[in-house]
Amino acid sequence: MTKPFSPSRRNFLTNGLKLGGGLTALLSGTPALAELCGITIPQQEGPYYPEGDLDRDADLVQLKPGGPLAKGTIIRVVGTVTDEDCRAIPDALVEIWQACHSGKYNHSEDPNSLELDPNFQYWGRARTDQNGRYEFRSVIPGYYPNTAKTYRPPHIHFKTHAPGHQSLTTQMYFDPDSFADPKVAAFVKRWNDYERVPASLIISFKSSTGKFDIALKRLV
């Protein structure tokens, strides 16, 4: 069941969409779209796609109005969903899921002994507006062990669907050098497999906001 929005939460999640070109100009960091809006690079879905009948609105930071906030650095992720010709796709469904601040997924198959955050939602979904724009509020996820010697870098999983287009699953990563707070930058930068991440999926953040654009392939 989708939780009710208080006026303050509703404004937070929609104001960015009303800023239009001003927001686009502000968020001039590394784009997820390849040159000429080529298809966004896909990545594996991973083992922790949400399970069960879950609350999946666009605010992962607060489970109910007036309730406690999730632990970690709060961020906004905004973007535009287009086709390969840069034409905006309205009413596309954008799903996200991720680990909490500690690096733990709320999933029955996650073997890590890291701590769950009872105040974090872990997954969300949003519909694009008439200009193809979407927005989420979340936290920077923690890194977690990948092997005995390596860690997965902080990332958010994305799965995007739109009628007449091929669904796309990918992952968004964080540019540590874009965070002014040295503690946040150090937290994000503790990666062992940075060189394996496609550059177009590493997103810069300004004032705790990052712009992650997604381009889908049209079906023939």
Image (spheres, rainbow, N blue to C red):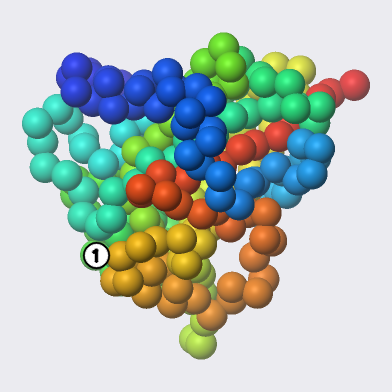
Q: Mark 1 points at which residue?
A: 115
Residue farthest right in this picture: 220
Residue 54 in view here:
no
Report the number of numbered marks.
1
Instruction: Reply above or below: 130 against 69.
Output: above
Can you give x and y, in whole percent of width and height, for residue 30 in the image?
A: 60, 52
Q: In which quarter of the image is residue 15?
A: top left
Identify the residue at horizontal 27%, vertical 20% (top origin).
Answer: 10
Can you give x and y, in whole percent of width and height, for residue 47 in the image?
A: 54, 55
Q: In which quarter of the image is the C terminus?
A: top right
Which element is circle 1 on?
loop
Can you give x and y, in whole percent of width and height, for residue 58 in the image?
A: 37, 30
In front: 218, or 199? 199
Residue farthest top in this picture: 130
In front: 182, or 159? 182
In front: 109, or 165? 165
Residue farthest bottom in this picture: 149
23 sits to left or right of 90: left
Can you give x and y, in whole percent of width and height, for residue 51 in the image?
A: 43, 41
Q: Quadrant of the N terminus?
A: top left
Q: Which amino acid does label 1 sit on?
A: Glu
The crowding category of the residue bearing disc 1, from other C-alpha atoms within 10 Å (few below 14, some 14 to 19, many at least 20), is few
Identify the residue at horizontal 75%, vertical 27% (top origin).
Answer: 86
Identify the residue at horizontal 53%, vertical 25% (top origin).
Answer: 21
Instruction: Reply above or below: 128 against 32.
Output: above
Identify the residue at horizontal 81%, vertical 27% (top origin).
Answer: 85
Q: In which quarter of the image is residue 217?
A: top right
Instruction: Reply above or below: 27 against 98.
Output: above
Residue 138 in view here:
yes
